[in-house]
Amino acid sequence: MPKRGAKKPEIVDAKRSKWLWKKEGNVEVELSREPTEYDGALHASKVRTVTRRNFPGVYNSTTGATKLPPRSETGLIRFPVSRDVMKRDPEHPEVYAIRLSAIVPLEVQDLIGNQWLRLVALGGVKTECSKDGNRSVTGAAHLGIWSHYSGVPYITKDTYQRKSSPEVQAATDELCHLVAQHLAPIIKRIIQIHSPSLIPKLERAHAYVQANLDDPSGKWRYINFLGAFSAFAVKEGSSEKLHLDFHDTRNFLTFMVPFALEGSYSGGYFFSPNLGAPIPVRPGDIMAAMTNLLGHCGTRATGGRRLVVTCFLDKFLMLHANQHWHIPRSPRPPKPELEEGEIIL
């Protein structure tokens, strides 16, 4: 038999890189179809209807249990977006979701976790008005900048607490500063490496905020997140009800960073029926996902106090930034082809 010709060096290098990548415990999961089941589900009732119809029995929000076995505890897990989707929208995220393992240094975990405990001890966490029964039985504080139902960006009420004591305000400022100083650079680097298609959106939103933010209280120095996100939610526990993040930017990534406050905890996995198996997210990990597209929740955490910092870009802020720069809206995904007798909700 004739000998096979030598392979091109670039092909050999690509195969070797792929082999080494898998050997390190990394996993790439290609979805069989674009995960648009929840697209257009604008209310919590629609999310529940889509779940019952398309994913019956996969998750029990009452018990926080799922029948599906979890994915690997360590390594990088990514869900790449197809070339067809990227051609349709060049500013679409290049991954639907990604989990990076052991990326937040232990000292950063301690700094942010301890600062949260100081804020709680001062009585500065009042989240009753921020409870969202569509996603959790516990509330969250929202810190940073958004444009909820406003034509201009503004600092959230939880960030600038006019009626709080100077000690509470100082502790809040320090928590924001720690997130800006330590988490924002990591998240921005993740975007640059794993989804550089989002960089134009980041730059537009950041420039828009800098040009239009009214900041008489001087909070910008604490909440300048380098354009990686505009705000973050911070809460203990899990968002255990399947939901969409309606106020997060479409076709963007939201980043979830867990912390262990007292001892270790079990559970607290990120779960989306669109992606299949639950994904463990431990202290030091960062989980990112298209939370405006993927139905998702956090499975219940037990055995310790779990804090989650969720970093996001407000959809109203991004909408106004695009209007400012005369950028058209991102195209919506096409409706899926239906089988005979099937209906779209």
Image (cartoon, grey):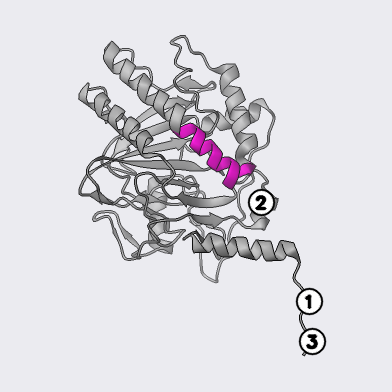
Residue at 77%, 90% (x, y): give it: 1
- Taking depth in this image into account, of 316 and 174 the one nearest to the observer is 174
Viewer-side residue, 31 vs 259: 259
Is residue 216 something one can see in this rendering? yes
Within 10 Å of disc 2 (Cα), the crowding (few <14, some 14-19, many 20+) is some
Question: Magenta part of the protein: which range?
Answer: 183-197
Place of residue 131 in the rendered image (x, y in percent of width and height, measured from the top left): 30, 35
Q: Are marks 3 and 1 in contact (CB under 8 Å)?
A: no
**Residue 86: which disc?**
2
Q: Which marked residue is nearer to the observer: mark 2 or mark 3?
A: 3
Q: Which residue is mark 3?
A: 2
The first of marks 2 and 3 along the sequence is: 3
Q: CA distance from mark 2 to mark 3?
A: 42 Å
- What element does badge 3 sit on? loop
Q: Disc 2 marks which amino acid?
A: Met
Label 2 SS: helix
**Disc 2 or disc 1, which is closer to the eye?**
1
Q: Quadrant of residue 85?
A: bottom right
| Residue indicated by mark 1 | 5
Between 114 and 30, which is closer to the camera in this rendering? 114
- Residue 158 can be seen, yes or no: no
Instruction: State yes or no: residue 257 in magenta.
Output: no
Total marks shown come to: 3
- The residues tagged by marks 3 and 1 sit, at their Cα atoms, a distance apart of 9 Å
Q: Amino acid at mark 3?
A: Pro
On the image, which quarter does residue 237 sit in? top left
